[in-house]
Image (cartoon, helix red, strand yellow):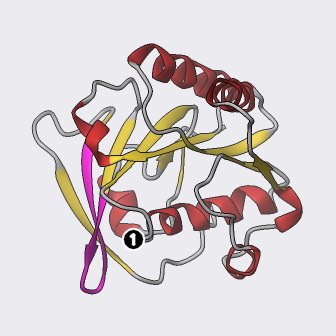
Amino acid sequence: GPAAIPTGFPALDAALPGGGWPLGALTEVLEERQGIGALSLFLPALAYLSRGGRWIAWFSPPYLPYAPALAMAGVELGRVLLVQAYTRDEGLWALEQALRSEACGACLGWIGAADFRVLRRLQLAAEAGRGLGVLFRPAVFAVQHSPAALRLRPGPRQAGMALQVLKCRGAWPAGPTTVGLDRDPPSVNP
């Protein structure tokens, strides 16, 4: 399959080496605070994957996903799985298994603190499953080394969102890059 799936944001697709979200790899979204719209960056890709019959698995989201908003974005609600584990270790184990599974087109995980060994296991699982793996983590972990292929820091902007690309496999030999995104992205149709 393709090495990337279009993000639905032309400016972001142009900035990323594969022309979109990397498949078979982890993408880390390092947020200063929740609620600035970082999840909306992935909605066009989630809609495309779910319409293609792939499962979209959510692991320990801080809030219950709002089904009407997902449906309005084109996500097939019958292809959405919500996993709430009893313990952190169970949640990480479930996330790793889903990333490894080729049944999941995308796995979204809110994991907080994790050492390099845990992140490496998740990265290897994403490579095996060849899907879209996204970890939402607090921005304080931006200083931590990570095996993720793509590391992003979203921030508010008057007409949408500014997205700072901290790390991107295959591009930018020095320094982060910032991409401005409009509020209403087109749908993904690769």
- Residue 164 quadrant: bottom left
Viewer-proximal residue among 120 and 189: 120
- The quadrant in which the C terminus is found is bottom right
Answer yes or no: is residue 79 visible. Answer: yes
Drawn side of residue 80 relative to residue 93, left or right? right
Answer yes or no: is residue 167 visible. Answer: no
- The quadrant in which the N terminus is found is top right
Name the residue located 74 percent from the left edge and 68 percent from the top edge. Answer: 75
Answer few, some or many: residues within 10 Å of disc 1's Cα (few below 14, many 20 plus, some between 14 and 19). some
Viewer-proximal residue among 21 and 59: 59
Drawn side of residue 189 relative to residue 145, left or right? right
Residue that protrudes farthest toward the top in the picture: 117
In the image, residue 115 sits, relative to residue 53, either above or below, namely: above
Residue that protrudes farthest toward the right in the picture: 78
Name the residue located 24 percent from the left edge and 85 percent from the top edge. Answer: 158
Judged from the image, the secondary structure of the residue bearing numbered disc 1 is: loop
Q: Position of residue 83 (x, y in %)?
A: 76, 45
Q: Which stretch is magenta? A: 154-166
Q: Amino acid at mark 1?
A: Ile
Name the residue located 33 percent from the left edge and 59 percent from the top edge. Answer: 14
Q: Position of residue 132 (x, y in %)?
A: 60, 42
Q: What residue is shown with label 1?
A: 36
Main secondary structure along the magenta-highlighted residues: strand
The answer to if 161 sits in the magenta stretch is yes
